């Protein structure tokens, strides 16, 4: 048995280091380099010569561009002030009341996540557009422009804000409330001295997330913005319309500012938030209060109805023969060969792309998180890999997409062949959504006993065997979570891929934009409906699998 | 038990594990300082000390899980200072059990065997043998979550021993268990260890655990070894006040050594054992264990007799812990253990003044701690 203690040809630690180095190179190619390409492009003129900040000077002295920046800022600010309070009350109802049907209300609040952002814009057009039956409610104002954008963005951002604030509210220590009650504190005082301070950080975090989502969203202003230009549509115009790559890069960098700001504020806040709740805290149990519960139920009902209407209107419209004159139902709008050169092609491409993103992306993300978290690699390597994995969080899809354009299009770039291929769409989408998957994987891995790897090496079992036999099976629920998250986002994403698709790789979400542009709103709604239903189906399959399959496979979880 | 357990390298008499000048830094914090230790084959050695004393760091350095900053470690005559864990020869058991939750008990125990490409029958037989050894026959098909904590720790022990390692490392193996289970498992681990003759290191902060299980105890504090010795030596002849106070309880009184065998404490001269390495006139601490203070049959005329007032009595079941104040110097306190018998026979009660004797042979002299 002595031979088993001998030095092997290649040591495990060498292999682990090599794998992490590979991961770092991959992430640099996927994330770091494109961002660098964007940055350097913004400092060059059309011929590629370095001109310092001249492009930025041009940008800030062009009235139309500054106008778009100002538009973006106030639209995002207005949306944030609308969404955060509403989301707070909704989240409060979900976590701090005895409202019935909490599961249903949670699901309804999350609905917009399963649709491309522009779906709510399409619904608004049907409701308030030139032929909308609620048009009069706008008192002569047009839905095309800031009103439509703010309304649609509010729906689109709502689930994100609710999730963040609800998480903050759930972190409450029930004992604080018991103490307050024992001291005879008035409910309003309890709210202002315990509830609000406790959730303050989550609310700030939600505000930043919403602001960033709005300012970087492309689909909604594209569909319902009309003549009202914002940063995201401006970038698109510069790149696709005028082939002015340098100015596009400048707009991209301007977009990066609020996102990076939000990223750092959020990280700072999360550190504080964690410290709020000690391990000994007791979960808060809401006491019955019929009046409060009724009021909150009505509120949630109203909000949920709007969200359902925003989704349902477009779906309904997609089955209508000729809005608003002939409301009889038809499948004609789903005969995409009449409206879209690729017919059903874009949908199938989307499916293929989302499938590949889910499988390859999840494999890369989970393996990468494992290598960083569990193997004994050199600390600097670990730090670099973690930083690169967290970076996409701070980078809006539109900016990443621009980076890819420059990265691939640079003269002599070895990656030029990727242009317009499915591969680049997959790579870009994985990079775009990398961080959330990485955080999910890291959280799951942190919950696994850190001594598993130590035990394995004492038994002379290499880490990759333990990864396959133990870590992966234990983490299966998290892996599925990541896969579904990647799939849903790959189905609905627009902002990054709009710059990267080619004639053979047009995606469903892009097809929606094109059909809408050409006036075929109903088929656009039909295609969007296909995306929503596919995304929701994926989530449902996930839930069913979790319940049926994994209960059987994961018998070991039962006591 | 397979006879392959014993390995043949190393000459008789040479230490099986040899640690030389081991240092470990975390940044500027010195976690281990100049650790030297020789352990014979088959010995059960316990690392004992308060939390943060470096005992776990030392164990992990021996395992190769956290590499030392400098110094060397040899196991079985082979220098493994730079070898990763997989190239050292040990099995390890953690406080958290670290059982693989998705594998059955049999798969857990056989985890290290499967990788050695042994025939399936051989693995099954070996797993059965180990299950019987740790007293869990018939549990092979269960999952860890279906077992109690004590049972899980037995499985972890079987898994660590499955590959017949030359060295067994136990990292606070009993700390997560209930008091009763802990005492039973203490005996079982010791028995298995003796039967297999496997050299064993155990980290613990529980002095009772160390005293009852180990052949030798390594008492550690602030990253240095305070004392190495058998449980008896450590208890009877602690070499530093820290060891004396950490293993059991001890009264420490400041004093000055007048001459060999004479020590002055609180303006009184007591007889004490003649100490060879302390110079007359040096400041010292005089130690005496609570149970060594004599009460029965003390007339008050003995050389080391003191009159004390019983300040407080703490009832602890089989005995009482008494806080005694020296009558002549009420600020000077002694802690003594009075058995229930003694309490009854002498009708001891709070407030009583009684003569007690500090027997010469029970006094320990330590050089005064410089900083204190």
Image: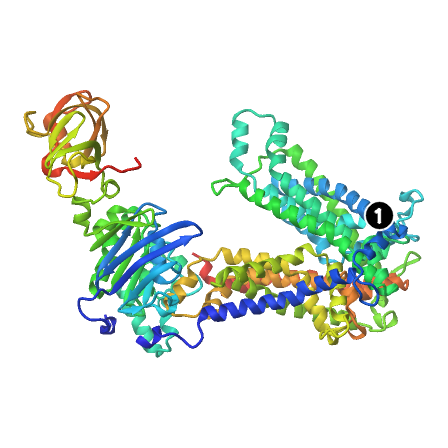
Examine the image and state in which quarter residue B273 appears. top left
> Does residue A364 appear left or right of residue A503 in this picture?
left
Name the residue located 20 percent from the left edge and 44 percent from the top edge: B238
- Mark 1 residue crowding within 10 angstroms, few (<14) / some (14–19) / many (20+): some
Name the residue located 28 percent from the left edge and 58 percent from the top edge: B201
Horizontal and vertical percent for residue A92?
A: 65, 40
Quarter holding the N terminus of chain A is bottom left
> Does residue A411 appear left or right of residue B214 in this picture?
right
> Does residue B38 appear left or right of residue A140 in this picture?
left
Of B356 and B115, nearer the camera is B356
Q: Which residue is mark 1?
A: A71
Horizontal and vertical percent for residue A66?
A: 86, 50
Horizontal and vertical percent for residue A339?
A: 87, 69
Name the residue located 63 percent from the left edge and 31 percent from the top edge: A192
Q: Is residue B154 visible?
A: yes
Name the residue located 54 percent from the left edge and 28 percent from the top edge: A181
Of B273 and A126, nearer the camera is B273
Of A394 and A534, nearer the camera is A394
In this rendering, the answer to whether A112 lies above or below A276 is below
In this rendering, the answer to whether A469 lies above or below A54 is below
Horizontal and vertical percent for residue B7?
A: 24, 72
In this rendering, the answer to whether A179 lies above or below A154 is above
Examine the image and state in which quarter residue B361 appears. top left
Of A9 and B240, nearer the camera is B240
Q: Is residue A329 visible?
A: no
């Amino acid at each position: 048995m002595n031979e088993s203690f001998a030095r092997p040809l290649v040591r495990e630690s060498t292999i682990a280091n090599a794998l992490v180095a590979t991961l770092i190179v991959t992430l640099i190619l996927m994330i770091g380099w494109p961002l660098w390409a964007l940055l350097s492009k913004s400092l060059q003129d059309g011929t590629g010569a370095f001109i310092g900040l001249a492009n930025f000077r041009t940008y800030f002295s062009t009235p139309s561009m500054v106008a778009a920046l100002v538009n973006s800022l106030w639209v995002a600010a207005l949306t944030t002030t609308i969404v955060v309070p509403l989301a707070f009350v909704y989240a409060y109802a979900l976590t701090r009341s005895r409202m019935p049907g909490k599961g249903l209300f949670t699901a309804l609040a999350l609905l917009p996540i399963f649709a491309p952002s522009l779906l709510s814009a399409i619904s608004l057009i049907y409701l308030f557009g030139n032929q909308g039956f609620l048009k009069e409610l706008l008192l002569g104002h047009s839905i095309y422009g800031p009103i439509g954008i703010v309304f649609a963005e509010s729906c689109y951002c709502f689930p994100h804000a609710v999730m963040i604030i609800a998480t903050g509210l759930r972190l409450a220590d029930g004992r604080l409330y018991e103490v307050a009650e024992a001291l005879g504190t008035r409910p309003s005082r309890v709210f202002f001295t315990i509830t609000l301070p406790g959730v303050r950080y989550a609310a700030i975090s939600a505000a930043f997330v919403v602001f960033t989502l709005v300012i970087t969203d492309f689909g909604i202003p594209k569909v319902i913005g009309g003549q009202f230009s914002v940063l995201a549509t401006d970038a698109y115009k510069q790149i696709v319309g005028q082939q002015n790559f340098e100015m596009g890069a400048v707009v991209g960098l301007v977009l990066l500012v609020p996102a990076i700001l939000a990223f750092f504020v959020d990280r700072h806040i999360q550190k504080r938030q964690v410290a709020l709740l000690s391990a000994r805290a007791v979960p808060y149990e809401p006491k019955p209060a019929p009046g409060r519960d009724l009021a909150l139920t009505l509120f949630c009902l109203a909000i949920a109805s709007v969200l359902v209407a925003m989704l349902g209107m477009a779906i309904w419209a997609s089955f209508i023969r000729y809005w608003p004159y002939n409301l009889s139902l038809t499948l004609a709008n789903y005969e995409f060969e009449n409206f879209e050169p690729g017919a059903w092609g874009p949908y199938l491409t989307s499916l293929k792309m989302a499938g590949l993103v889910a499988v390859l992306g999840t494999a890369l993300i989970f393996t990468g998180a494992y290598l960083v978290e569990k193997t004994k690699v050199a600390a600097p390597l670990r730090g670099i890999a973690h930083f690169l994995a967290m970076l996409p969080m701070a980078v809006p899809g539109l900016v990443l997409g621009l980076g890819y354009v420059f990265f691939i299009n640079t003269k002599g770039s070895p990656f030029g062949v990727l242009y317009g291929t499915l591969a680049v769409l997959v790579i870009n989408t994985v990079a775009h959504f990398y961080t959330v998957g990485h955080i999910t994987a890291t959280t799951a891995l942190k919950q696994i006993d850190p001594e598993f790897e130590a035990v394995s090496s004492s038994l002379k079992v290499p880490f990759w065997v333990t990864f396959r036999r133990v870590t992966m099976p234990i983490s299966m629920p998290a892996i599925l979570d990541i896969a579904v998250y990647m799939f849903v986002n790959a189905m609905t994403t627009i902002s990054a891929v709009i710059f990267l698709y080619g004639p053979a790789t047009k995606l469903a979400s892009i097809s929606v934009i094109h059909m809408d542009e050409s006036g075929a709103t109903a088929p656009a709604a039909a295609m969007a409906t296909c995306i929503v239903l596919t995304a929701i189906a994926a989530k449902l399959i996930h839930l069913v699998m979790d319940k049926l399959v994994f209960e059987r496979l994961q018998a070991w979880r039962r006591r | 038990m397979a006879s392959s357990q014993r390995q043949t390298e190393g000459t008789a008499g040479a230490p099986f594990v040899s640690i030389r000048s081991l240092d470990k830094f975390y940044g500027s914090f010195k976690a281990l300082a100049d650790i030297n230790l020789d352990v014979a084959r088959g010995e059960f050695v316990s690392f004992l000390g308060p939390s943060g004393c470096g005992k776990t760091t030392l164990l992990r350095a021996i395992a190769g899980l956290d590499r030392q900053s400098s110094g060397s470690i040899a196991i079985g005559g082979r220098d493994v200072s730079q070898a990763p864990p997989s190239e050292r020869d040990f099995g390890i058991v953690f406080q958290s059990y670290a059982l693989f939750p998705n594998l059955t008990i049999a798969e857990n125990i056989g985890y290290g065997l499967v990788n050695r490409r042994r025939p399936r029958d051989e693995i099954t037989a070996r797993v059965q043998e180990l299950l019987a050894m740790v007293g869990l026959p018939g549990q092979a098909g269960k999952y860890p979550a279906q077992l109690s904590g004590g049972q899980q720790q037995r499985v972890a022990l079987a898994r660590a021993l499955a590959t017949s390692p030359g060295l067994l490392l136990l990292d606070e193996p009993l700390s997560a268990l209930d008091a009763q289970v802990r005492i039973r498992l203490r005996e079982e681990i010791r028995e298995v260890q003796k039967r297999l003759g496997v050299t064993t290191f155990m980290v613990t902060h529980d002095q009772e655990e160390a005293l009852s299980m180990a052949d030798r105890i390594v008492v550690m504090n602030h990253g240095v070894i305070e004392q190495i010795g058998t449980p008896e030596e450590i208890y009877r002849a602690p070499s530093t006040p820290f060891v004396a106070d950490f293993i059991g309880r001890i009264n420490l009184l400041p004093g000055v050594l007048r001459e060999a065998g004479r020590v002055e404490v609180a303006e009184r001269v007591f007889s004490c054992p003649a100490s060879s390495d302390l110079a007359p006139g040096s400041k010292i601490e005089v130690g005496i264990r609570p149970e060594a203070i004599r009460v029965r049959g003390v007339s008050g005329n003995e050389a080391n007799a003191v009159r004390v007032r019983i300040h407080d009595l703490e009832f602890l079941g089989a005995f009482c812990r008494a806080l005694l104040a020296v009558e002549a110097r009420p600020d000077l306190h002694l802690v003594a253990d009075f058995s229930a018998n003694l309490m009854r026979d002498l009708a001891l009660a709070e407030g009583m003044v009684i003569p007690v004797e500090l027997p010469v042979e029970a006094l320990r002299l330590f050089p005064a701690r410089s900083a204190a």
